[in-house]
Amino acid sequence: MRKKHLKIKKSDKVIVLAGKEVGKIGTVLKVDSEKGRVVVEKLNMIKRHSKPSAKTGQGGIVEKEGPLNISNVMIVCDKCTEPTRVGKRVLEDGSKVRICRKCGEPMDR
């Protein structure tokens, strides 16, 4: 299966569109392009039971972020603070940047 190029990157601000966390905004911690999933900071928390080991020390129930499907999140523009689709533009120096479809401002710093 071919790896799909995704428009959402690590440290982007996203809003959740579907599921139990709908309407919440968070920062992307990890993007899995193979499975088409993203992990968003402090959203979709799941509980995992862990055994004690030398690395973790004490065992117990650990809460961590679970992955969300990439189709259920939408990127939020920094300038206009609106959920928006992402476009691409080539600058004068030849570099490609992602742009906000609502305000036209570049999203890449």
Image: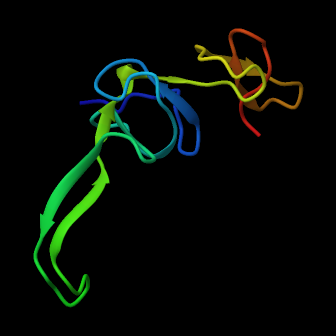
For residue 13, above or below residue 7:
below
Residue at 32 percent across and 33 percent down: it is: 68
Q: Position of residue 34 (x, y in %)?
A: 30, 37
Q: Quadrant of residue 56?
A: bottom left
Q: Quadrant of residue 1?
A: top left
For residue 67, above or below residue 75:
below
Left or right, residue 66 beside residue 29: left
For residue 99, above or below residue 21:
above
The furthest residue to the right: 92
Q: Position of residue 78 (x, y in %)?
A: 72, 29
The furthest residue to the top: 102
Which residue is at the front of the view, 40 or 95? 40
Q: Position of residue 67 (x, y in %)?
A: 30, 40
Q: Is the image coloured rainbow, by chain, by secondary structure, or in one colour? A: rainbow
Which residue is at the front of the view, 54 or 3? 54
Quarter of the figure with the C terminus: top right
Residue at 29 percent across and 26 percent down: it is: 20
Residue at 77 percent across and 32 percent down: it is: 95
Q: Position of residue 77 (x, y in %)?
A: 68, 24
Which residue is at the front of the view, 69 or 108? 69
Residue at 16 percent across and 78 percent down: it is: 59
Left or right, residue 26 beside residue 68: right
Number of numbered callouts drawn: 0
